[in-house]
Every structure is written in C-alpha cells, then in structure tokens.
Image (spheres, rainbow, N blue to C red):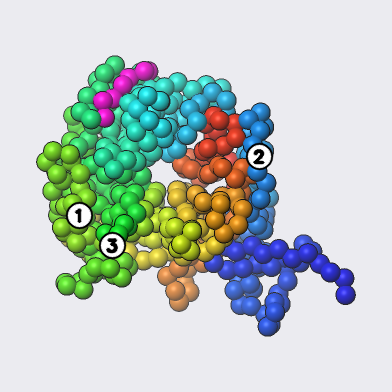
C-alpha cells in the first residue's frame, strides 16, 4: 500500500482528516461522526463561511526577519485577500481599532498597548498608512470603539485602568493624559469616564441608550475568582439615533454599575458559571474607583480573564440584547478557553434592569482552538471571527489562528454549528488582535501584534462572498 501523509485540522473541537489532499472519512476504529460534520462544513465553506476553503492546520513557520514583507506574516483561507494598511511607521503594539468617520472612513483610530511614555492612541490614514499620535500617557491602551452616539471611547487593560471618551479625533494631535489624575493636556476633547469604574478593560460594548457591558481581564488566583462581567446603566440615557458632539451630553457622565452574579438565590458561586443570573448593584472604591472588591462582596461570578466582547447586531436589530465574548483560558494547564454569550432581555429591559441575564457557551476551546482573545461580529453573515493569543511554547510550536464560527442553528444543542480556520500567522511571536468589520461585513481590519517587523501592522482582509 502506498503511504500517504495525513494531517489533522480541528475546528470548533471537531477534527477533519486530510490524506494526500483528499478528505478521509474513516479513522482507526471506523468512521467518526465529528469528522463527517467538519468535512461537510469544509465542503460548504462558501455557503457557511464565505470562503472557498479553510486552512487545514496552523502554520509552524517562524519569520524573524525585520525586513520581511508584512504580507508574508499571515496565510489566509482560499478566497480571502489582504491589503497592507500600514507597517513600518505605526507604534509596535496596535490593538483594538475603529474606522473614522463611520459613514465614509478615511482613517483608523487605534490603541497602542504600551506604557505611558509611548503613544496610546494613533490615527492612521487608510490611503497612505501614515500614523500620527493623538494622545499619550496611558498604560496598555487596549479597547477602542466608536459609540452608537458617535464619540470614541478607549481604555486601559491595567488593574487600575480607566475609560476615556473623545470627540473630534481629527483635531487632536499630541495630547497627554495623566492616568493617575485623569487630567488631559493639549485638548478639551478628551475626558476620563470614572463612572464606569476602574479595572482591566478589554471587551466593552454599548447600546444606543448608553447601557454598557464590559469585562475585567483578570485571572483567578489562590482560590479568588477571576474577572467579572459588568453592566453600566446611565443616569441620563439617550434616545435611539441621538448623536453627541459635546462630551457633557454623553450618557457616560454618570450612572450605576452592576456586576453579574450567575445563579438563583443561594445557589451561586464556584461551578455556577452558565445559566440565569442577576445584575448586582455595586459601588466602586471612592478613592481608586476599583470595582473588584465590591464585585467580590456582591458574590459576582468570576471567569478566566474575560477578553474582548462584541454586541450581536442581528439580535439587537430584532429587539433583543445579546453579546458574546471570550474567556482566554490557560493553555499550559490544558484549559483552552471558551466563547460565551450573554442575553439581557430587550433594550428597554436592559435599561430598566428588569431582564434575567443568561450565560450560555457558544464554543468550547481545544488544543487547536485555544487561548482565544478578540472577537468580531460579521455584519450580514452573522458569523463570529475569533482570534487566538496562544502561548506558542506550550504543547507544540504553532502559530495563532483566526477562526470563523457559525451561530447555533436549529439543532439540539446551544453551541456554534462549527468553526473554520480562516487565517494562520507565520511568526511564532505574533498574535492576531483587534479585528473588526466595516458596516458592510466585507472588510475585516486586523492588527498583527508583536510581529518580526517591530512595527504596528494592520491588514484589510476582503474576499468574503
């Protein structure tokens, strides 16, 4: 018998075996139902994922040449194409980002995840790739989004991190924030938002009213719970469609914070992380603004480093509130992380805090799909694009991947109907981060952080059918 080389790709926890380039149905012991399912997803990749075919396995290539072509840093699923937005001029650790202006974008606004002496927020020209620093002074600037009311929010992924809100980002260059006092010099168009509390911000999403959801990027330690999820309800909510041009009119000026406690009555605590819950009112520390002690006192549920989250736009358009986010996990301990979704009634119920929040898993991690970090909702198609941030020295040398995961369909479980690997890096030190779609769902902008070039690198990925 002629020997054939076999490779295995695992997507969404299910394996697809390819032998000599041909899908193999049989494995030792007979056919495998999971492999059949994954092979069917691959065979219908264009229908379900908008690509011609997925990537069968993670790359093991390790580019370490600073002069390497930035487009060589990543391989994409067949049918997808990448355009280099910037490389060689931007700050090195670009993370989350947003297009500006939203309707006819000409710039990307992005956080740089470094210390106070380095750029915190940069403005990158979409046509030329030129980068300008808007503001400095923060530690680990990570989340950055345009709010439904038209302002820009950005924050720090630090234990004492704060959120900030900005208007007129094209008019600001070289401003400085004193992160200890919140004072801003060089502009009147940026303010700190202490009403949201102090924590390690990463995932954050807002409704048009100003209701916000966010997580604390904190790992459990010595029996103490990990990071909790929080809800902000503004004291002065906005009507749908309201645009804010004066920061004094923002819904983030004041409001109440609630921490998520999963469970019913006394049936709460460790091991109760999915299902129905309640939003428990908390009061941040009056001096530091930290919410962690108050969340623990309220018996808030802890998760393993809540990372990015994204609002389910289809659910919101249909009248209900749902967001999905990642808990990163710990690869060296063989906890591979998870993607979970939280529902919170209708927009009116979310504002009134009368709904029963419910947490359910969407994707369970595996050795292939592990230490997941950022997540992006794809408009139109409704898939979730999920970024890995794995520790490559553990398990086996492998690069970080991009996955496209389906929503749950009409089958018996509540989990995603499957995931497909749509991107893999060729630099073992690099990670995908901060990816987001434009309003059409056709352009996916994503940063390749910690890459060999030593500069911030952003790709514009297109080709979805």
Which mark, by number, is residue 63?
Answer: 2
Note whether 405 is above or below 247 in the view shown: below
Rendered image: mark on residue 130? none
Q: Quadrant of the N terminus?
A: bottom right
Instruction: Tell me, yes or no, whether the two marked residues, 1 and 3, touch with CB atoms within 8 Å.
Output: no
| Left or right position of 360 against 66 | left
Tell whether label 3 touches label 2 (CB within 8 Å): no
Sequence order check, earlier mark of 1 and 3: 3
Helix, strand, or loop for circle 3?
loop
Picture layout, residue 14 above or below residue 61: below
Please provide percent x and percent y for residue 137: 32, 26
Res. 393 in view = yes
**Pair 2/3: label in front:** 3
- Residue at point 19%, 62% (across, down): 299
**Residue visible at 45% across and 48% down?**
374
**Residue at 69% across, 68% down:** 17
Label 3 sits on residue: 223
Quick one: which residue is furthest to the bottom in this view? 29
The foreground one among 54 and 274 is 274
Residues in magenta, as a range: 173-179
Q: Which is more toward the observer, 12 or 66?
A: 66
Q: Nearer the viewer, mark 1 or mark 3?
A: 3
Cα–Cα span, label 1 and label 3:
15 Å
Examine the rendered structure and indicate whether residue 172 appears above or below residue 41: above
Percent across and percent down for residue 54 are: 65, 56
Mark 1 — residue? Answer: 295
Is there any visible trace of residue 258 in the rendered image?
no
First-in-chain label (2 vs 3): 2
């Amino acid at each position: 018998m002629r020997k054939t080389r076999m490779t295995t790709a695992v997507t969404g926890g299910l394996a697809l075996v390819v032998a000599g380039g041909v899908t193999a149905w049989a494995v030792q012991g007979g056919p495998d139902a999971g492999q059949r399912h994954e092979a069917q997803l691959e065979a219908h990749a264009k229908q379900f994922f908008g690509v011609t075919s997925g990537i069968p396995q993670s790359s093991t290539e390790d580019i370490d040449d600073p002069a390497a072509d930035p487009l060589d840093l990543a391989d994409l699923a067949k049918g997808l194409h990448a355009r280099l937005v910037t490389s060689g001029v931007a700050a090195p650790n670009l993370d989350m980002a947003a297009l500006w202006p939203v309707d006819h974008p000409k710039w990307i606004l992005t956080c740089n995840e470094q210390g106070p002496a380095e750029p915190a927020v940069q403005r990158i020209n979409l046509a030329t790739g030129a980068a300008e620093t808007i503001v400095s002074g923060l530690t680990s600037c990570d989340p950055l989004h345009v709010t439904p009311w038209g302002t820009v929010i950005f924050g720090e992924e630090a234990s004492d991190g704060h959120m900030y809100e900005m208007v007129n980002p094209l008019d600001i260059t070289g401003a400085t924030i004193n992160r200890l006092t919140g004072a801003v010099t060089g502009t009147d168009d940026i303010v700190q938002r202490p009403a949201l509390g102090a924590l390690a911000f990463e995932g954050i999403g807002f409704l048009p009213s100003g209701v916000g959801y966010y997580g604390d990027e904190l790992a459990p330690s010595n029996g103490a719970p990990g990071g909790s999820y929080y809800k902000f309800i503004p004291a002065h909510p906005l009507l749908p469609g309201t645009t804010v041009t004066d920061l004094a009119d923002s819904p983030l000026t004041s409001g109440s914070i609630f921490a998520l406690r999963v469970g019913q009555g006394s049936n709460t605590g460790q091991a109760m992380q999915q299902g129905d819950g309640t939003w428990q009112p908390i009061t941040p520390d009056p001096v530091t603004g930290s919410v962690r002690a108050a969340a623990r006192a309220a018996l808030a549920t802890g998760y393993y480093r809540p990372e990015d989250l994204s609002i389910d736009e289809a659910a919101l358009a249909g009248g209900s509130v749902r967001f999905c986010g990642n808990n990163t996990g710990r690869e060296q301990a063989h906890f591979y992380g998870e993607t979970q979704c939280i529902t919170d009634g209708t927009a009116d119920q979310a504002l009134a805090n009368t709904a029963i929040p419910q947490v359910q898993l969407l994707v369970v991690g595996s050795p292939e799909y592990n230490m997941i970090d950022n997540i992006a909702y794809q408009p139109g198609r409704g898939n979730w694009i999920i970024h890995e941030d794995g520790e490559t020295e553990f398990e086996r040398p492998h690069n970080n991947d991009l996955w496209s995961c389906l929503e749950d369909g009409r089958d018996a479980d509540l989990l995603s109907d499957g995931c497909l690997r749509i991107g893999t890096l060729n630099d073992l030190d690099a990670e995908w981060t901060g990816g987001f779609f434009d309003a059409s769902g056709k352009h996916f902008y994503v940063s390749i952080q910690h890459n060999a070039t030593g500069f911030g690198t952003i790709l514009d990925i297109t080709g979805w059918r």
